[in-house]
Image (cartoon, rainbow, N blue to C red):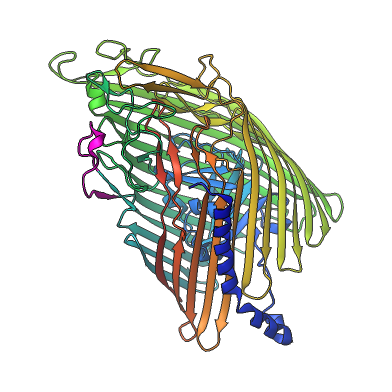
Amino acid sequence: MTYSEPKLRRHFAILLGCTAALAWPLAAQAQDTAEDTEAQDTQSGGLAEIVVTAQKRAQNVQETPLSVTAISGETLAVQGVTEVADLNRVDPALQIGKATGTVTTFIRGVGNPVTTAGNEASVPVYIDDVYFIRASFAYFDLSSVERVEVLKGPQGTLFGRNASGGVINIVTKDPDTSSPEMKATLGYGNYQTMDASLYANMPIGDRVAANIALSYNDQGEGWGRNKKLVDPLDTSLGYQDGGEDYWKGRHFSARGKLLFDLTDTIDLKLVGYYVNLHSQIGIYSRPFPGTVGGSPDAAHNGFPIVPGAMPDPSQVLPQLGFYDVSLAEEQYDDNEGYGFSGKLDVELGFADFTSITAWRKSDELYYSAGNYSDYNWLRYDLNVIDEQFSQEFQLKSKIMSPVEWILGLYYLDAKGGFNPTTIYGPGTDMAGIDYLDIRGRQDVSSYAAFGQVTYPVTDNFNITGGLRYTIDKVTGTGTTDITFLPGVFGPDPLTIRAQQFDANNDYGGANGVAIVDGDNPNHSRKYKKLTWRAAADYKVTADALLYASLSRGYKAGTFNTLPLDLPALNPEVVDAYEIGFKTEFGGNVRLNGALFWNDIKNPQIQAQRNGLVFLANAEASRTKGVELDLSWAPVYGLTFRVAGSYLDAKFRGFGDVDGNGTLDCATYEYSDVAPGNIDQLTTDCSGNRLPYASKWKFSGGMDYEHDFAGAGRARFNLSASWSDKYPWDADNVYFEPSRFLMDGSISFTPEDYDHVTFRFWMKNITGEKYNINYYAQASGSAYSSAPGAPRTFGGEISFDF
């Protein structure tokens, strides 16, 4: 939905009106507390201090000289932010989507939407100090977390591993030896959605404690339906009645921690976790508005199955409801993962030592209808493997040391890929092929050494310098096995191992296939990079900090695992320049801001050519912008927050993404209704806007708590966000329209039963229709998307012990 200025004003008027209505009782409360000195001491307004570990040590977020947004676990729970993808609504610098069970992350325009196994994000997610290469979004459940930190800009020194755009750092609750605790929550919402969560903390003696966090969500009814065509070859006949539910899913996650205070100077923390996901949410399943389903050049007896033209389609499938699909077979994603980590902290006489060891593995099975239409043209069964081991050592100065320093070593061993991807259906039958098994795998070995020091020039002025040297070895292996139908090369099926298709990728050999026996060649590349950070900060007053920084971030080169025979990518390098300020006024007003400029060399982006969508290097891009964040707590129990960002993100040069000598970002094949009229259109993306980069974004809200004498305690929360339109791809052909989202909740804790809380909530109050992801088939159609959630609402009851 595109927002005109009057409509946008109306939506913010709704937010303002609701805020005013909820805040009306405050006038009397403020007057009473002003007249009562004792009450004023105990009920004065104030913003809570948040401690972060953005620089690998505990610091007040207002004293950390870099751009970081920190959200406490309590705030996340009140606002109904239950997963990483919901952070879009909290921090305007973020753009996060869901895709085939995982998430795509962008900060300040830096990132890529490719979720292919083996590809690593430019904005990685860390959970309890552990880097996650690729994981189901069920891993990123935000129940029972201590806080989430969003670090903006390259983090190439301390976090380092592929953090060219920034970092999302999730810190879960640690066990506590002081007292037992338990919280259980049960909820039910529309679309037959059941929620349940449990958090329990148990001291085991004076030096040992354990906790466990369980979370379960089951959406039994889909947002839309899968409506089948009466005749897939004649769309004019429309759809059959009814249809199965679509856009639903379930997930379960479990996490446990053990804390051992071995001695007064040695602590050991062990973590284990398990997730299980079965979902259609985030899977590309319906044609993007204005495009066709199926492939225009997919023909039967010489005529296209679904005629159309690209990039400006002339024929569209009969209109479905926004949440409806028309698929020959169901698409879904199954993902199971588990892992362990251990953190050892040792206080030495001159410094503190930390060791972080982690291992995780996941297995994913993704069923895809390749042409996203009711004609069963192609089917993809993707078996995804993902496993990693990491080890990090840190040695850092004592907390009160006049010079702060940290030294570290890091090692990562990871593998990810397809084992296999099976392709079959009428589309392969026409070429005499029963099915194809494509295997592609990437192995990564990464070594790094890093250090950073902060030196106090004066009591108020500090300078910081840091270096990180990384060596990445990346190896890609893969095969393509083709099984031919009986009768093609004899009476029995024949399976051969094909090295490559012909140069034009047009299936031009015998029976449509050019055959070269033997394994696909292995590919191996080594990358070495020095990244750095230089910064200065000046404390103007006790509550005002100015800072400036220059930093370089790096994302290692990579291979496409599907298909493997494309050239290896060069590393993505980001040089970032930033100045910012952090201020507080009287303890109840907080205003932070930053100006930034990022020069990006060899950005890794999604590109299209000859029926393939793949990861490639553009030549260069640039992002620049400004961010502001204001929080205000005028009286006890009431907090307002508003944040905004402006982002100008463009390709400065696109270059030759696939090595064929052509300056392009996409090549589209298109066809007319008549057979044989297949041609190509090549576009140059230099000067285009970066994908997923909104120029303007805003978020805001209010939270109000009030005690009703003799009754109990109530809490009202209202939050909203607005995002400007942004392009889905480098070609800037299709844009996601601007969107306005509003969420709200009311909770009540009875005075006589203060361990019980009732909460009622609603998300997407205005019923906004929007997409959370998009996928482009370079064959000229099957531009498909996945919708975000419609208006949802429900209630829950929580028990605290």
Residue nearest the viewer, comparing 309 with 449: 309
Q: Which residues are magenta?
A: 228-245
Q: Residue furthest top?
A: 510
- Residue 279 pos. (x, y %): 34, 49
- Residue 593 pos. (x, y %): 71, 52
Residue nearest the viewer, comparing 685 with 487: 685
Residue 636 versus residue 139 in the image, above or below = below
Residue 199 versus residue 132 in the image, above or below = below
From where the camera sits, is residue 398 visible?
A: no
Residue 238 is one of the magenta-drawn residues: yes
Q: Residue furthest left?
A: 491
From where the camera sits, is residue 126 visible?
A: yes
Q: Residue furthest right?
A: 458
Residue 209 versus residue 482 in the image, above or below = below
Residue 728 versus residue 794 in the image, above or below = above
Residue 578 is one of the magenta-drawn residues: no
Residue nearest the viewer, comparing 613 with 488: 613
Q: Residue furthest bottom?
A: 710
Principal secondary structure, stretch drawn in magenta: loop
- Residue 540 pos. (x, y %): 84, 57
Residue nearest the viewer, comparing 575 with 91: 91
Please state the total of marks drawn on the protein image.
0
Question: Does 786 sit left or right of 424 as displayed?
Answer: right
